[in-house]
Amino acid sequence: MKVRSVELIVLLGLAAAGVWYLVSATSFLEAGEPDYYLNPGFFPTILGCALLLFITVSLVQTLFRTSNREAFPARNTRRVILVIGLTAAYLLLWSMIEPLFYLFTVLFFLAVSLVLTLKRGTPLLPAIARLGLVAVLLTGLVYLIFDVTFGISLT
């Protein structure tokens, strides 16, 4: 797959997410008090507009670029597709079963780590133990940052 194709796919996906974010942000604008200039939707709307502006600039740059080399070796295509699928499944499970967020996060980190680091012939059990520990530590870090430090519950 060529770099230009990958960039266009990612940028179009980001543009769709940016439009969704901007629509969500503008719903907060209507909920604000009429006496105040800064309401809850003010900064998210600015961020959404900036995101769409930067995506547009990047799209134009990508379309006018002349070089078009391979993005990644063809042998890694299966890994890329698998990581995209794991990410989609993770986000879907998180939205459907919120109370199990931390369990899904540990499993997601472990699965992606295994997909990206394992080579044929590598012993599986030591890799699972090592990467499982890293997954638990990363999830613990997410918990400490959001739940403990900022008081934002992800479940």
Image: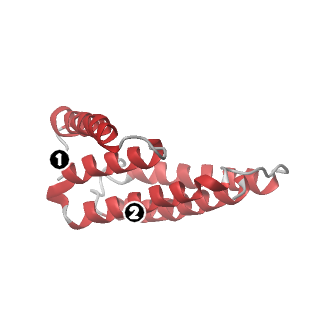
Disc assigned to residue 88: 2
Q: Point out the residue furthest to the right here.
A: 66
Q: Residue 117: where, in percent of width, then height?
A: 45, 41
Residue type for callout 2: Ala
Q: Looking at the image, how many numbered discs can be counted on the residues?
A: 2
The answer to which of 31 and 79 lies nearer the viewer is 79
Please indicate whether residue 94 sits to the left or right of residue 123 in the image.
left
| Disc 1 secondary structure class | loop
Viewer-side residue, 43 vs 80: 80
**Crowding at label 2, few (<14), some or many (≥20) Cα neighbours within 10 Å?**
few
Element assignment for label 2: helix
Residue 56 appears in the figure: no
Disc number for residue 153: 1
Residue drawn at 59 percent across, 58 percent down: 77
Q: Nearer the viewer, residue 22 or 127?
A: 127
Residue 136 percent location from the top left of the image: 23, 38
Q: What type is the residue that disc 1 sits on?
A: Ser
Residue 141 x %, y %: 25, 33
Task: Farthest residue to the front: give it.
Answer: 121
Q: Is residue 33 visible?
A: yes
Q: From what the image shows, is residue 108 above or below residue 128?
A: below
- Residue under the image location 85 percent in, 51 percent down: 66
Left/right of residue 21 with respect to residue 55 in the rendered view: left
User: In the drawing, does residue 118 fall left or right of residue 136?
Assistant: right
Between circles 2 and 1, the one closer to the viewer is 2
Residue at horizontal 51%, vertical 61%?
81
